[in-house]
Image: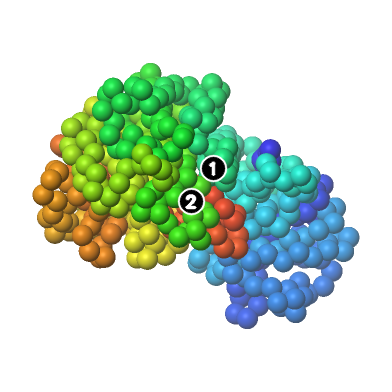
Amino acid sequence: MTTASLRNATAPTVKADAVVIGVIADGDGFAPAPGAPLAHGAIDGWGGDLAATLKDLGASAKPGDVCKLPSGGSMKAPLLVVAGLGASEDVTPETLRKASGAAARALGGKRTVAIALPSSTDDQVRAVVEGSLMGAYAYDRYLTKKQEPIGEIVLLTELARSKSAKAAVVEAVCVAEAVNYTRDLVNTPPNDLYPESFAHEVALRAKKSKVKVSVTAEDELESRGYGGLLGVGKGSARPPRLVTLTYQPSRPVAHLAFVGKGITFDSGGLSIKPSSAMVTMKCDMSGAAAVAAATFAIAELGLPVRVSSYLCLAENMPAGNATRPGDVLTMYGGKTVEVLNTDAEGRLVLADGLVTANAVEPDLIVDVATLTGACVVALGNRVTGVFSNDAELLQEIPKLAAEAGELMWPLPIPEEMKEKLRTTKIADLSQHNPDLWGGALFAAAFLREFVGEGIPWAHLDIAGPAFNSEAPHGYTPKGGTGVAVRTLVTLARSRSTQA
């Protein structure tokens, strides 16, 4: 596991396998990044025109671009890595996350990497450490030849002795580890991660934390009337689970409830997906993974916020006893739903989880789910859609997400969706929209029907950004991304200071 520390030393003098410095765009060329005085000696002592060399090599100052050069004896480290930070006015914490993450990805296997990026504030320190640890992530559980991670990240900063900067490092390590834990869960293949094993893994992780875990198995789910979870899981040889995580600090100032969609593999059920669309469907439990990881991180940070989290775990498979289009399910709490498309299963398990969350009377409920392809069509594969029954919360969540470094965008739940939900004549609600349009909006409207009266609620549709099937970028690897973890932690931190 990669470690992180602070050191007040100049880039040329530090003993490391590589030194990372930042540059900004300066017309057609490059200039040293402001706010990183400990890096200047690396540029001055390089022994040539670094800007001209970078230009000749086709390097760019774009955020996330990196270029590796031999140090040429100008410093103790043999390798100089130049990371782009964009224009000087664009150097934000997220820019620093991307730059440090891209540099870390390019330096896998190095024992010690010194990073001399801008770090004159606690926020910058936090961002650089967070980005570098997320960028250093590698998933090699199933590889016979293991990928050596970076051994140690050393951030060169004049704040090395500052208590608040040290606290920022602790927080960054906690959050980055939570993101990487989520990625591990998402990347685990579905033959090894299924409802029972997922529940077992979370219970094991809880033994090292202040989070209590309870697991509701299929017999109890049936006796208590969890029709959504049971209906989705009927076609699988691996029955569903409801996992409850509880963090109860001594004097909580707020109570948050998180609900995560945990479909460990989604074949589409009898409304079966094309085979090509199933390839990444191990990621359909990303919401539950993010909820679990965020709960553990909030507890580890000791935030004075009570958290009640619910992981709705099932495997959606076709079989002779699988739920059929046209079936009617009785959800937990008693509402009936006509199933029209078994590939719209996430909303069914979430409905059970939302009703369960209502019972603990939280101040706020947030559900996280890889819910609809329609949201990907609307926002692309890097932006999360946000829906809510509360106008202020609908604006608050994207702002907190931006602070955390995640892209989220508010979307509406039009009044017409309430009518579409009731087009069925044999049940309380239709599970699927009757036409092709507004699928993400309909799904959000469906979920809203299961939120308790007067409870503020937000729904995060992470179908796009939860899994990166393309090339790595910044601190984002190929595969599971860990999206929403940072936003949930930032939300808890925000609520902890509002009392």
Q: Which residue corresponds to the image point at 61% horizontal and 75% vertical from the top-left? A: 26
Sort mark 2 into few (<14), some (14-19) or many (20+) by Cα contacts within 10 Å: many
Q: Quadrant of the C terminus?
A: top left
Q: Quadrant of the N terminus?
A: top right
Query: Above or below — where is 11 with respect to 471?
Result: above
Rendered image: mark on residue 231: none
Give the residue type at disc 1.
Answer: Pro
Per the image, the residue denoted by label 1 is 190
Rendered image: mark on residue 281: 2
Q: Is residue 214 left or right of residue 457?
A: right
Q: Nearer the viewer, residue 430 or 298?
A: 430
Query: Above or below — where is 36 with respect to 24?
Result: above
Q: Nearer the viewer, residue 476 or 224?
A: 224
Q: Position of residue 317 (x, y in %)?
A: 43, 44
Q: Position of residue 184 (x, y in %)?
A: 58, 42
Q: Given the current orientation, which residue lies at the most extreme top position?
A: 250
Sort mark 1 into few (<14), some (14-19) or many (20+) by Cα contacts within 10 Å: many
Q: Of callouts 2 and 1, which one flags the residue occurring earlier in the amino acid sequence?
A: 1
- CA distance separating discs 2 and 1: 9 Å
Q: Quadrant of residue 379?
A: bottom left
Q: Are marks 2 and 1 in contact (CB under 8 Å)?
A: yes
Q: Position of residue 41 (x, y in %)?
A: 76, 59
